[in-house]
Image: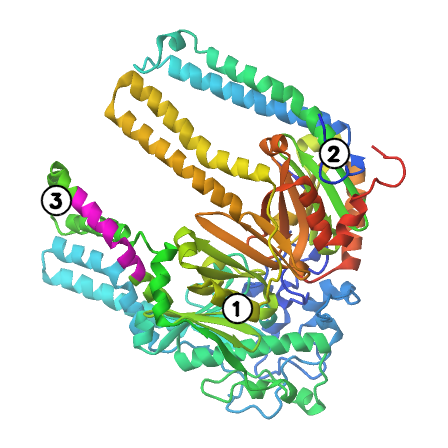
């Protein structure tokens, strides 16, 4: 798989622990979706409605099985693809980040236009010692979210960005 | 999901305004400022510190000679930022200023002993309020009369209801006051709960005066003060001031806004006399308005220049825009709904209505004729509506504001601060392009509801629109560059494939079942797929992006083609997107993040070279570090 974007890759990968994070998140979503489709199939299959085909009423488990078969490749691939895609860099007072799984995004945010820098941790991230950095500007298209950073890296980066932003503050927007 | 959020907010939330000083923000510790940063424009009562205290002491001059107007509460959280640079406009924070913002130049005229006089809305608004409540009151009243059988007691109840409405309006009027105090507009409501809204003048983005029919009859107007806050709730609204008062307030507000900014910028030296007399100068109705509260060097006659008055014959272009085209259907729907509602209230049973409907259903030709009539009426009704709403459209340049006035029944005037205008968007539909006419909107930072309020021009010839936008905001002088041929294939595929798929499926269903409905559906879908060919080609022709050294421009769309022109300095970042399908085709969507308007303006399906070179051309310093290989070994 080629990762060549229009510009060179950002220098730093996110923390390797992010693979675990994405795997856990994907697993949770997987369980919810497959479980939900199983419940729905059981309900429809057992209802005895006339429009339900007989073969389905006899085998209601076929729906969750099909869903699971469809989703499993994604479940397995997503964390690793994301780990190879997600990268970030801070050079020349510009944050450059690449994210995505099926759709990729390259974001450039100049530090002079940053309004807030948030460091957030969900409970999974806390468990793994990870953090998400949210860099916001006046525009959603010019804002960036970097997931799966090591907590200390994120804290250092947030501090650094906030300080630089203060120095470079530009009010053109 | 519980988020343990450690937030670093960059001090000075200049998301929208260059001046960090915001009195009202006082007690809010800065570190927990909302990421949006702009939502604290208008603030409830209790967050104001020293002002209330000053108000409590009767007659105490709220702005003493040396006391900084915003006291400890306003200063403390911002104190550490006094040395912060403040961008190109060059404002300094309020903290560096020991001069009250509006020391009157002369002795205040006509002030009571307290030195302040909050104003009420025009009492004439009392005539409007009960009338406005009428529709709400009417049905219950009619109900009471019907149920009560026109007996004496039911009349009493109805009368009590009407009196109650009037009394309510009276109390509301009496307890609603407003006042310009120093550099703030305060709106005080104490009907049920006391609330005092403080709007710092420097946060005022624009003032919008409109005159709904009833107001116009009585010579009243509605004044809306736009602060750029997200919710409509946080804006100031004075519903029912006299027209003169509206104009006067608007002029005073806009002038004071300009002065507040100038003051903040220059730390203007006010004379000792002015400082000594440091009292707030509330505005008196009909009194000497501007010059009193404003030092001499800032008071000037507002300059006004009409940029364009749209001629009446151009109203004929209206229906081409497709605006209000569905008016006949909306009216018919509304009439049917009303008929049902009133039929119920008046005792005409639902059954009768159903019977009427069934009667109509049994005569399909009648239904068809009705629908045809409605369709034929579309351009006419749409044109009339368009004419009513955009009657006598004028665009003016008044003292640093672009003012757009329009409307026949409800005359509306929207002021956009020129300083906040970052560009414009020129929009045309299919029919409009044939006729060579376009519409134009301004791209303004922090303007809520920009689709209706930001309109710069109604449907006018393209050359006129180009001239007006170039004159009022700035020209765009470059060609748009075409996107790679792959983009044409993608446009065509996206315009044709969905309909073709539906058509083929319907065809298969038709062949297997033989139902007429499937055949109709198949023919329709395939016809739409056929139309997709010219549509896709036109969409490709529309695609383009360019940069002329000051402004960048992107264009896309066919049924509604829009070309955005945005200043370079408004760009706050870049985003390049590539979906899985785009990756197959080797193209990207390049989005210029702009802190105004829609927030981002995309160039769809650009080549890899364009995605790389265009941002580098517009903002070379941002992209330079990422064009070459990084120095040193990677730390991945």
Using the rendered image of the protein, determine whether residue B223 is visible from the camera's viewpoint.
no
Q: Main secondary structure of the magenta part?
A: helix
Q: Which circle marks residue B596 in the picture?
A: none
- When the figure is inspected, residue B161 is found, relative to residue A92, above or below; the finding is below
- Residue at the right extreme, as displayed: B632
Callout 2: SS = strand
Residue B384: where, in percent of width, then height?
A: 29, 62
Label 1 and label 2 in one chain: no
Q: Chain of mark 1?
A: B
Residue B494 relative to residue B163: left or right: right
Q: Look at mark 2 in the image and give the residue it sits on.
A: A130
Q: Give the number of the mark in front: 1 or 2.
A: 1
Task: Give the residue at x 67% y 48%.
Answer: B574
Task: Give the residue at x 49% y 44%.
Answer: B539
Q: Give the number of the mark in front: 3 or 1.
A: 1
Does the stretch in magenta take in B369?
yes
Residue B80: where, in percent of width, then height?
A: 78, 63
Q: Look at mark 1 in the image and give the residue it sits on.
A: B467
Callout 3: SS = loop
Give the magenta part as a residue range.
B368-383
Q: Quadrant of the C terminus of chain A?
A: bottom right
Q: Look at mark 3 in the image and give the residue it sits on.
A: B349
Q: CA distance from mark 3 to mark 1?
A: 60 Å
């Amino acid at each position: 798989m080629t990762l060549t974007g229009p510009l060179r890759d950002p220098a730093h990968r996110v923390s390797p622990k992010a693979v675990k994070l994405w795997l856990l998140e994907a697993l949770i979503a997987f369980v919810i979706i497959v479980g939900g489709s199983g419940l729905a199939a059981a309900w429809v299959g057992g209802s005895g409605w006339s429009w339900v085909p007989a073969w389905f009423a006899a085998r209601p488990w076929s729906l969750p099985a099909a869903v699971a078969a469809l989703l499993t490749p994604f479940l397995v691939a997503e964390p690793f693809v994301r780990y190879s895609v997600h990268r970030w860099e801070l050079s020349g007072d510009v944050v450059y980040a690449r994210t995505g799984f099926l759709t990729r995004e390259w974001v450039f945010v100049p530090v002079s236009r940053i309004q807030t820098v948030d460091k957030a941790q969900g409970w999974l991230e806390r468990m793994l010692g990870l953090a998400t950095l949210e860099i916001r500007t006046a525009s959603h298209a010019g804002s960036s979210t970097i997931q799966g950073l090591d907590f200390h890296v994120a804290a250092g980066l947030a501090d650094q960005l906030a300080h630089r932003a203060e120095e470079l503050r530009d009010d053109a927007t | 999901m519980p988020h343990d959020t450690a937030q670093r907010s960059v001090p000075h939330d200049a998301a929208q305004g260059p001046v960090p000083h915001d009195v009202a923000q006082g007690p809010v510790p800065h570190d927990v400022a909302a990421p949006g940063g702009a939502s604290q424009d208008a603030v409830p009562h209790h967050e104001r510190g020293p002002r209330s205290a000053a108000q409590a002491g009767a007659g105490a001059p709220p702005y003493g000679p040396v006391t900084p107007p915003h006291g400890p509460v306003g200063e403390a959280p911002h104190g550490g930022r006094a040395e912060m640079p403040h961008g190109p406009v060059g404002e300094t924070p309020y903290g560096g200023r020991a001069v009250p913002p509006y020391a009157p130049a002369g002795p205040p005229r006509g002030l009571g002993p307290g030195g302040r006089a909050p104003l009420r809305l025009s009492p004439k608004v009392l005539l409007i309020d009960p009338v406005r409540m009428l529709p709400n009151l009417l049905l219950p009243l009619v109900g009471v009369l019907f149920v009560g059988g026109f007996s004496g007691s039911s009349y009493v109840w109805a009368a009590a209801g009407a009196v109650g409405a009037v009394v309510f309006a009276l109390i509301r009027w009496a307890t609603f006051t407003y006042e310009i105090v120093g550099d703030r507009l305060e709106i005080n409501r104490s009907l049920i709960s006391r609330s005092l809204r403080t709007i710092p003048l420097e946060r005022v983005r624009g003032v919008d005066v409109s005159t709904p029919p009833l107001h116009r009859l009585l010579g009243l107007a509605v004044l809306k003060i736009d602060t750029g806050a997200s919710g409509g709730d946080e804006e100031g609204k004075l519903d029912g001031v006299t027209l003169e008062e509206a104009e006067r307030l608007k002029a005073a507000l806009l002038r004071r806004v300009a002065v507040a900014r100038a003051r903040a910028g220059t730390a203007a030296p006010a004379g000792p006399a002015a400082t000594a007399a440091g009292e707030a100068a509330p505005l008196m109705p009909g009194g000497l308005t501007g010059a009193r509260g404003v030092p001499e060097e800032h008071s000037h006659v507002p300059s006004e220049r009409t940029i364009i008055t749209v001629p009446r014959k151009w109203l004929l272009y209206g229906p081409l825009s497709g605006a209000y085209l569905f008016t006949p259907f909306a009216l018919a729907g509304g009439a049917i709904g009303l008929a049902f509602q009133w039929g119920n209230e008046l005792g005409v049973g639902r059954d009768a209505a159903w019977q009427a409907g069934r009667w109509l259903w049994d005569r399909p030709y009648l239904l068809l004729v009705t629908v045809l009539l409605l369709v034929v009426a579309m351009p006419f009704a749409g044109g009339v509506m368009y004419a009513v709403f955009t009657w006598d459209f004028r665009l003016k340049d008044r003292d640093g504001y672009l003012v757009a006035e329009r409307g026949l029944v409800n005359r509306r005037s929207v002021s956009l601060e020129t300083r906040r205008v970052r560009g414009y968007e020129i929009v045309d539909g299919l029919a409009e392009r044939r006729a060579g006419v376009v519409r134009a909107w301004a791209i303004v930072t922090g303007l809520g509801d920009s689709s209706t309020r930001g309109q710069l021009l109604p449907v006018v010839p393209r050359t006129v629109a180009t001239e007006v936008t170039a004159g009022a905001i700035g020209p765009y002088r470059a060609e748009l560059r075409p996107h790679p041929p792959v983009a044409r294939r993608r446009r065509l595929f996206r315009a044709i494939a969905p309909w073709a798929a539906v058509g083929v499926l319907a065809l298969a269903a038709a062949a297997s079942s033989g139902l007429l409905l499937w055949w109709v559906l198949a023919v329709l879908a395939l016809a739409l797929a056929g139309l997709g060919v010219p549509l896709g080609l036109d969409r490709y022709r529309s695609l383009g992006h360019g940069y002329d050294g000051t402004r960048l421009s992107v264009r896309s769309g066919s049924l509604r083609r829009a070309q955005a022109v945005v200043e370079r300095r408004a760009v706050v970042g870049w985003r390049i997107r590539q979906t899985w399908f785009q990756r197959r085709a080797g193209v990207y969507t390049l989005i210029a993040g702009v802190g105004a308007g829609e927030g981002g303006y995309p160039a769809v399906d650009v080549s890899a070279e364009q995605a790389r070179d265009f941002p580098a051309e517009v903002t070379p310093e941002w992209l330079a570090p990422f064009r070459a290989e990084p120095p040193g070994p990677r730390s991945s």
